[in-house]
Image: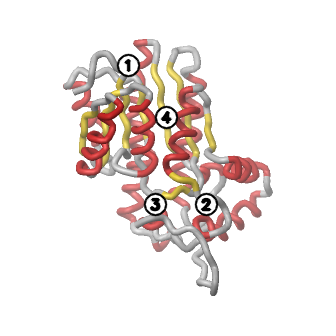
Amino acid sequence: MASLDRPLAVVTGASSGIGADLARELAKDGYDLVLVARRAAPMQALADEIKVNGASAIVLACDLSKAGAAQTLVGEIEAQGLAIDVLVNAAGLGGSGRFDQSDPVRLAEMLQVNVVALTELTRLLLPGMVRRGRGKILLVASTAAFQPGPQMAVYSASKAYVLSFGEAITYEFRDTGVHVTTLCPGPTATGFARIAGIEDVPLFNGPAHVMTAAEVAHLGYQGLKANRSVVVAGRLNALMAMSGRVAPHSLSLAIGNYLMSHQPPSSGSTGHTPPS
């Protein structure tokens, strides 16, 4: 049970990766947590882990790819009489491949998690923050938000939505005491590439630095505390994001297509392979 003496944060996508490490950052900084993801077991392990920081956590297994899941989740939170100080929308789904060869069901689930559930949770929890005159919201987008992404068309478009949405509501609520930060990670060692089937593409297997989830979470949380509107994790990623906005459109598309194209293995080549 959450303590009345500690602020409370909801973290989606809390079973692994950036979401789990953001939960760790919050616990170290004095927050109790509501952990949300499909898989309860890893969240329970995380809840046990963060007890060393004096934090308590409520574990709510919830599949945000299902319509109505956000409303059900908020209903459970409200039924326990919990006031939310921080919302971290870190749940996300990815996928790769040419659009006409993509699984329509997977695409619908991706949009439900990346766009619909994120929007609904923000809409449902933000008014309480406004009434109390304080609160923080962290939206996890991607550097894919800064330019179209051939071979990941729907994923990139969903993250462009998150970035645009985040920047807009940051401005709308600038005088309310509620601050919104959008975190844009680049390639990150979370298992995302393995699940999406893109371990061998240049974006993940090239010379660029692949950050750890802990590194990304730390930068994102520091940006949230500083009330920054947008945080691009890593200097190289920030440079690439900026170049995507100023480079000729045709060049950005060509580079994006190359970075997501499956490459034949070459002898002696080395690169990062995300953990299984």
Tell me the amino acid under the disc marked 4: Leu
Tell me the amino acid under the disc marked 1: Gly
- Mark 2 and mark 3: Cα distance apart in space: 16 Å
Please give the residue where the numbered disc 2 appears in the rendered image: 149
From this view, report whether residue 76 is shown above or below residue 83.
Answer: below
Please give the residue where the numbered disc 3 appears in the rendered image: 192
- Nearer the camera: disc 1 or disc 4: 4
The secondary structure type at the circle numbered 1 is helix
- Mark 1 and mark 2: Cα distance apart in space: 36 Å
Tell me the amino acid under the disc marked 2: Gly
- Mark 3 and mark 1: Cα distance apart in space: 33 Å
From this view, report whether residue 120 is shown above or below residue 193.
Answer: above
Q: Quadrant of the C terminus?
A: bottom left
- Mark 4 and mark 3: Cα distance apart in space: 20 Å
**Are discs 2 and 4 less than 8 Å apart at CB?**
no
- Please give the name of the residue rendered at 57% of the width and 41% of the height, measured from the top-left corner: 163
- Mark 2 and mark 4: Cα distance apart in space: 23 Å
